[in-house]
Amino acid sequence: MAAVAGEVAGPVARPSVAVAGGRIGPNAITRVAEALGILHGEAARQQVFARAQLLHYLDAPPASMVDETEVQRLHRALRASFDAKAARRLARLAGECTGDYLLAHRIPRPLQLVLECMPARLAAHVLLSAIRRHAWTFAGSGRFTALAGRPIRLTITHCPLCRDEHAMDGTAQCDYYAATFERLFRALVHYDVRVTEVQCEAAGGNACEFEACW
């Protein structure tokens, strides 16, 4: 628990603006719980979920779409409970676990085999099309766009993970999304894909924009 702090300098939360209808898949909560357990143990899980007022999800993990404000609270609590390096590591691990879950349970194995056999640029087009179709499961009330090319650009405008926050040090805050995208692209497009958040709304950007390169 040494990494957990009562008050750690980091993103400053602005008054939250409720957006009607925004819902996100449960992985944005359940994989954070998983990552906390792996890296810091049960006490840290309890502390962070209590801070987010989501302790009930440790007893009964969500199995369907959740209100995006709950996801906002949890990821905000994660950043507030740990120093910046530890919080980013946790968010990345949660994103990697989400990618693993999607590969194991949501993307049919025959399709994965087909993508693995395609040239990387063609596989990227197919994967981008699938991500666009399912953006409603992770972008909430935000707007997702994706552009093929080198690099591939994935953008979430009005991003739910960092909405209403301001990163004091100007660093990007959406490691969870970056790691999820990276895990999928590495498994299905090219083993050496790296996804980087090149601008973030919490750091003054117009949107949260990610570049996938290999």
Image (cartoon, rainbow, N blue to C red):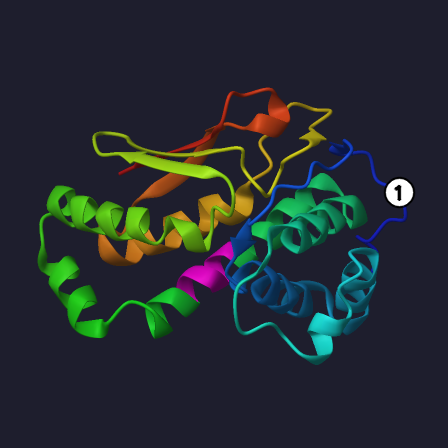
Badge 1: residue crowd in 10 Å (few <14, some 14–19, many ≥20): few
Three-letter amino acid code at the position of disc 1: Glu
- Horizontal side, residue 197 vs residue 193: left or right: right
Range shown magenta: 95-100
Task: Name the secondary structure under disc 1.
Answer: loop
Above-or-below relation of 27 to 179: below
Pick whichever, 79 or 39, lies toward us: 79
Pick whichever, 186 or 146, lies toward us: 146
Q: Which residue is at a point 67% across and 42% down the rendered structure image?
A: 85
Q: List x then y, in percent, for residue 95.
A: 50, 55
Query: Furthest residue to the right?
Result: 6
- Horizontal side, residue 124 vs residue 182: left or right: left
Q: List x then y, in percent, for residue 178.
A: 46, 44
Would you identify the image quadrant in which residue 201 lies?
top right
Would you identify the image quadrant in which residue 57 lies?
bottom right
Residue with the mark numbered 1: 7
Above-or-below relation of 125 to 210: below
Quadrant location of the N terminus in the rendered image? bottom right
